[in-house]
Image (cartoon, rainbow, N blue to C red):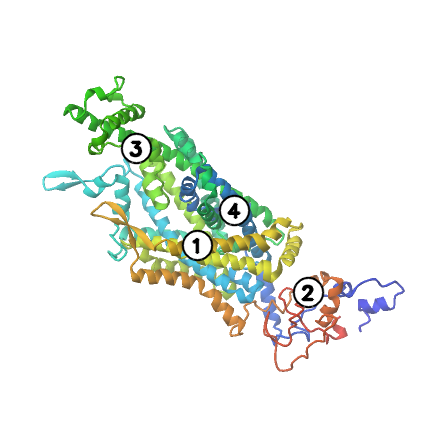
Amino acid sequence: MPKNSKVTQREHSSEHVTESVADLLAHQEPVDYKRSVLNVTGETWDKQKEGEEDLEAENRPAWNSKLQYILAQIGYSVGLGNVWRFPYLCQKNGGGAYLVPYLVLLIIIGLPLFFLELAVGQRIRRGSIGVWNYICPRLGGIGYASCLVCFFVGLYYNVIIGWSIFYFFKSFQYPLPWSECPIVKNGSVAVVETECERSSATTYFWYRETLDISNSISESGGLNWKMTLCLLVAWSLVGLAMIKGIQSSGKVMYFSSLFPYLVLVCFLVRGLLLRGAVDGIMHMFTPKLDKMLDPQVWREAATQVFFALGLGFGGVIAFSSYNKQDNNCHFDATLVSFINFFTSVLATLVVFAVLGFKANIMNEKCVVENAEKILGYLNTNVLSHDLIPPHVNFSHLTAKDYNEMYRVIMTVKEGHFKELGLDACLLEDELNKSVQGTGLAFIAFTEAMTHFPASPFWSVMFFLMLINLGLGSMIGTMSGITTPIIDTFKVRKEVFTVGCCIFAFVVGLIFVQRSGNYFVTMFDDYSATLPLTVVVILENIAVAWIYGTKKFMQELTEMLGFRPYQFYYYTWKYVSPICMAVLMTASIIQLGVSPPGYSAWIREEAAEKFLFYPTWAMAILISLIILASLPLPLVFILRQFHLVSDGSNALSVTYKKGRMMKDISNLEDNDETRFILSKVPSETPSPMPTHRSYLGPGSNSPMEMSSAPNGRYGSGYLLASTPESEL
């Protein structure tokens, strides 16, 4: 043993030796196992390659500031769903009572899983592919599945941004083009467009002027050139924002993340000043407590929590991978989760303030139309003047007076009342007309804005907000593709980003046909829900059960400088997997119970009609689900039978400088023998084969100790033959 060895010095010292084997080893310089006889991978040490790997780790891009990173995570998680999905679910599922299950599930599912993704991204500093290859190579398909789902979602999500761009440019005119039905000439007579007259001006503008929609998914109708151009602009914006990675997208986030809040606050202030806004907000937050006992409400709340935070897409992991190792990602997870929740509540206030105003406008219109009918019946003696209360003034008829008159006529003319064709004109009925998604943004909200003073200004602000909300989410979604691919395959960032955007634009032309809206519905309903649920369950299992919750908590303690609450231990290990499994089962049942179909706009009827998907569309639908889930079993099989590399980039055997000693210092006393001999005291090590090299983590090589896994990867290394010089 060398004279300068710490062990030799202690032998010649009269000082009492109290250090353990692990302590002695911890005093030595870290061993590089590629250079030593412990290199069991069969690889030769490449000094230049190692230098490049270290340089790459050091030169990984980083956020300019903590604020930029937080804004990026907020911009990604706060998207269109917060504006047009959450308010609908709130109204549908019990108003204020819906906030209770949503908040409960946000705390026990959303926050822990969001924290988990932030932590693994920051700890390993790789995209989703590298992270899950590192944690559990056999489940490396998680990263590839996330990339595929991101691609599918990005395809149709950018189409929605394209629609918003179209409406944005159409807003620079007064009156707004969707405020009135168009007039067409029928010979020498000018008449209102029939389709518009039978529906409404905003509905007509959406389906005919914007989408020029066909009657079914089977009728392609060719490309809609206006939407094709808008889609090109949308992909150009995404490409420009992403081309330099976080250096460019981070700067975009300052505007795209903050501007929507400015617009929402402006709309809230303006909305509260509108007549009827309070009616909408009161209707919204009046709790229907019986709804809280409905399992369907909890399922929809869990699904909304799941998608609102962007879990499973890989964007969260990608963004956190550019953080410093000592960043407090627990604080980030809590902050972003609750900002997301409060944004949803703020958006709900805005939506229902505006919809309350719209409901009052529509109710007044209903009263005027039905009052004219009653006047006609009075003039033709169908109804007697005695039925009209003396205080009613038809020139200034209020909704209250009309309702009183309506009840009297209904009571007296009970046998012939239906023939009169009078409507009740109840404000509650207007408020109960729930709309979501494109129906809310492009029909209901646009109709309300036509009644605003200075309506073009508010329209420009609204659609610019939608563009920014969509752009923030698209940057996160595209990062879920570009970051892991660039990290794994070392492709050039600019070339890959541009190529990805061009390819996505070409594939996305399917969504700008006249039947394109039906494909958007298909992708939205089926391409992500089930595959992402499976992905997140496997993420949870990989960390909590395969990697080990205790080990993960210990590494978080080292990384953060404090131990996370025990709450996370139990949620990661038990609560979240069970809840996600229940959600997946409910989603499968829902897919089986709900007939696979879509709402088609029938031009001749000027109305929506539910249609079933044809056989070829069902084949596409099923293929989407299978294709998004395929990497999971495929990668597992290939790595289980060693048909491909384990994908861990040799990190599973080749420890970076300082890493091995860190693991040694954490060994417990009774683990020292196992560390040195790679066995428990009662066992004899298996003989080392001379003809077979180490096959990777979890392999069935004779070199692996099945009963006593050691280190990060659950594989024991035979160190019994370590020469003294290495110590």
Can residue 258 be seen? no
Helix, strand or loop for disc 2 = helix
Residue denoted by label 3: 362
Q: Residues within 10 Å of mark 2 (few under 14, many from 20)?
A: some
The Cα atoms of the two marked residues, 2 and 1, are separated by 44 Å
The Cα atoms of the two marked residues, 4 and 3, are separated by 37 Å
Residue denoted by label 1: 587
The Cα atoms of the two marked residues, 2 and 3, are separated by 71 Å
Compared with residue 183, is residue 13 higher up or lower down, i.e. above or below? below
Q: Residue furthest right?
A: 14
Compared with residue 601, is residue 552 higher up or lower down, i.e. above or below? below
Left or right? Give the position of 517 relative to 114.
left
Q: Residues within 10 Å of mark 1 (few under 14, many from 20)?
A: some
Q: Residue at x 55, y 61 (%)?
A: 131
Q: Position of residue 510 (x, y in %)?
A: 31, 58
Q: Residue furthest front?
A: 415
Quadrant of the rendered image containing residue 358: top left
Q: Which corner quadrant holds the C terminus?
A: bottom right
Mark 4 vs mark 3, foreground winner is 4
Mark 4 vs mark 2, foreground winner is 4
Name the amino acid type tagged 4: Leu
Helix, strand or loop for disc 4 = helix
**Front residue (pair 455, 447):** 447
Name the amino acid type tagged 2: Met
Left or right? Give the position of 219 relative to 471.
left
Q: Residue at x 25, y 45 (%)?
A: 607
Q: Earlier in the sequence, mark 4 or mark 3?
A: 4
Residue denoted by label 2: 660
Q: Earlier in the sequence, mark 2 or mark 3?
A: 3
Q: Residue at x 23, y 45 (%)?
A: 606
Residue denoted by label 4: 105
Name the amino acid type tagged 3: Met
